[in-house]
Image (cartoon, rainbow, N blue to C red):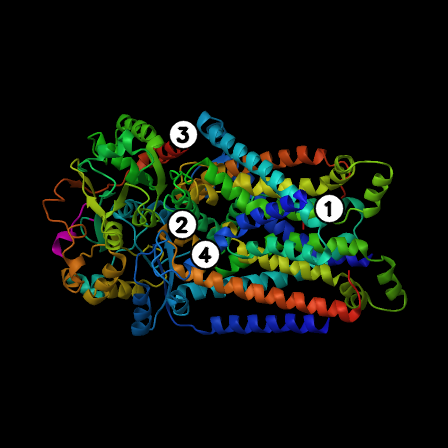
Amino acid sequence: MVEKIGKRLYTFLIFLFLYAPIIVLIVFSFNDSKSRGVWAGFTFKWYIELFKDAGILRALYYTLLIAALSAIISTIIGTLAAIGISNMPGISKKIVLNLNYLPVLNPDIVTAVSLMALYRFLRLEFGFITMLLSHITFSIPYVILSVLPKLKQMNKHLAEAAMDLGATPFYALRKVVIPEIMPGIITGGLIAFTLSVDDFVISFFNTGKGVSNLSIEIFSMTRRGINPVINALSTLMFISLMILLLIINKRTEKNEIERGELR
Amino acid sequence: MRMKRTAYPYILWIGIFIVIPLFLILYFAFTAGNSQDFSSFEISLSNFRRFFTPIYLKVLGRSVNLAFISTIICLALGYPMAYIISKERHKKRNIMILMFVIPMWMNFLLRTYAWLTLLGRNGFINFIITKIGLKPLDLIFNDKAVLLGMVYNFLPFMVLPIYSILVKIDKNLIEAAEDLGANRFEIFTKVIFPLSIPGVITGITMVFIPAMSTFIISSLLGGNKYNLIGNLIEQQFRWTGDWHFGSSMSIILMVFILITMAITSKFDKEKEGGGGGLW
Amino acid sequence: MKKIKSIVLFVLVAVIASMLAGCGESKPSINVFNWGDYIDEGVLKEFEKEYGVKVNYSMYATNEDLYVKLKQGGESFDVIFPSDYMIERMVREGMLAKLDKDNIPNLKNIDKSFFGLDYDPDDEYSVPYMWGTVGIIYNKTMVDDVVDSWDILWEEKYKDQIIMLNSQRDTIAVALLKLGYSMNTRNIDELEEAKAELIKQRPLVWAYQGDEVKDTMVGGEAAFAVVWSGDAVAMIRDNPDLEYVIPKEGTNLWFDDMVIPANAKNKEDAEKFIDFMCRPDIAAKNADYIGYSTPIPEAIDLLPEDMKNSKVAYPSEKEIENTEIFRDPMDIVVEYDRIWTEVLSGE
């Protein structure tokens, strides 16, 4: 009994710790003052201003655009790479996997400055393209890491059997391999999307021409005082995320019941 | 076997975006000259000589120290949490894990900044403390605030990998241990914990690296009073424009982390090539 | 499966469509690079509407930040807003383009006293945007002493009540002024002394902040902060307990000017933009929004009463008698870097 209460309390405290700042964000999105220190009454005005704030909306647009593009591109390249890697002989497999680990293990500031050096060396103009390329670069390893285990679980002979039966490699890939590893691909894509949305350091060093994502916008705000408009935006994003997750949860539950399986 | 060709685009990508940039950084680190003019470079160790002086070593020491402490705290807080979650029933378990992931979808700068509102002199925590008649505390712009920021931001990176290993532990193993008369403490120390070590190692890696290299947490919650190595690198590239010194510090940071990881993974006897336990 | 495929396809189409939409407009554009929170962004829209020129707007935090970005290349800007000493340095290094004054008729609106200053003696490169001083802002409810000297920032009893600027040039200048030296000193011994002063002060300092100091002071969390006068105006507006003083040892008088980099791609529209910013109604909008002091008298007349009469934003001649303008540190800029790193890294 004591143990149970202890566990509950511990869980509660940890979640309180995780969510306290988020509660603060949400509460202060209704605060009728620009300053973070003072509570000056309830207002909706930041939500109205949000839809008039061209700077933040543009940053939101770039954030989502880059996240979507980099997720799609890195998922495609990463999935193909994972399939290729799993078919490689021992040594080259090891080399590629270790190289693949580099961006994961490298501190993001090192990745950021090394990419910055590359673009300068290639004389690329900093802007949308450099930011996108950087995001793809740090996303692919995570896609590979989430697809590889699924490939390992898959029956190796499946694709061979398909090809023995006359399927072209491409056809076998499309009809046999890809469906088999789909959960891994989706996880990989979601991770890529999340990483891109949340990235600050790498974007910060590799953007230009007024292209900025939400993180960069927020960073410059932390220096001049956070505009509550951004709190309003976060609240909206938080709520829509919650709704989305609830829907997904409900649907998978329904599916599971329909299929009569509980994993 | 023909399918290995599908990896070629990525190998090309690795070459351009991972290998070449690292060589560029290495090149910058071991040369000196005007960063803006490639032709003026000459081979030199002066950047490293400059780094290995008390003032910079102190910064490195402080970064290691803070990263180390925050990793320990994350482990101490995160392991029990992961354990508790893994013992819950399927549905509740999934919801709890989701609740760990959701905060990561909110911008981390914003979440860190929100701590200022909580910890500030006139912040929420002090408001409560003064309400119950105690003297307000100085909670912000010190080492402890930086540590709190690190633990807050990186705790999920500790919990998730440990959890994903713990749920996969074969129940039969535990039952077998019970049948053989092991008590709960023994089951934990002899069966569960050893099996969860790969998750612990992934967790340590995922916390230690960002904690070691952050420059935002120290500047937001530390009031710019506590330079970490991440701050030094940022300053060299952004304000001072000395790419050579900045690069050499990046290399030092990288080497340091790789060594730490090599030591940590020594403890992981059953390491497998793929290391898919990251997520 | 089908569903996922169609979702991916949908996203792809949407993304490509929006990209094409973005590329479709081939309006002329200028890249403007300014300090954070240093313009009324509505003004940009007005400019876009009136001139049919698109403005790509981005921001930096310090003069050094701006300089490095410019030097590193990879990005070209058409209008930037450096301060006095940085203009001097950029001119010296040939980074700026000479202005064609025929394209900037509104120059006539600017007060004559802003011309012929040391950093651009012949006014060939720069047009003043805002100006001000550096001083101490303090909370009257928390301080009983008379605040009239930089020395108060070294008072033991105000430990953890002091906020210094997170800007190397300004903070080193405060220490130099306290010691009675010129803030443009080129004497390394004097700079070393300033460093020692700052290291001595460090345990008393609560934080080194930039613009975020506004929140801290308005929220009443610290007693003192070193700030730029324009920020002081904005802070006093939000918290009347605050007061701004220029210490008796003197201070820095600074100017942020609009200039065009030598490698600008659209110099003509950049000059139009500068001209537009010198129009009294536009200058007034900016000055009102950010709280800083405009060099255009007609614009001052358009400001609300409290700002027009603000002693902080528009001090009398006597109050700014004892001021100095930053000069380009030239070769000793590396000393500044070193000193600042050592101050922030020391214990």
Q: Residue A220 location, x and y as percent?
A: 40, 53
**Closer to the observer: label 1 or label 2?**
1
Query: Quick one: quadrant of the N terminus of chain A?
Result: top right
Quarter of the image for residue C191 reads top left
Determine whether the residue tagged by mark 1 lies in a helix, strand or loop.
helix
Q: Give the residue pinned by disc 4.
A: A25
Which label number is shown at residue C346?
A: 3
Question: Are circles 4 and 2 on residues that touch, CB within 8 Å?
Answer: no
Judge the density around disc 2: few (<14), some (14-19), many (≥20) Cα neighbours within 10 Å.
some
Quarter of the image for residue B191 reads top right
* Most foreground residue, C56 or B224: B224
Furthest residue to the front?
A1
The chain to which mark 4 is attached is A
Which label number is shown at residue C69?
A: 2
The chain to which mark 1 is attached is B
Furthest residue to the left?
C318
Q: Residue C335 location, x and y as percent?
A: 34, 33
The chain to which mark 3 is attached is C
Cα separation between marks 4 and 2: 33 Å
Q: Amino acid at mark 4?
A: Leu
Q: Is residue B124 magenta?
A: no
Q: Residue A70 location, x and y as percent?
A: 59, 61
Magenta-colored span: C111-120
Of callouts 2 and 3, the N-terminal one: 2
Which label number is shown at residue B166?
A: 1
Q: Amino acid at mark 3?
A: Gly
Q: Is residue B236 left or right of residue C5?
A: left
Q: Is residue C112 magenta?
A: yes
Determine whether the residue tagged by mark 4 lies in a helix, strand or loop.
helix
**Closer to the observer: label 3 or label 4?**
4
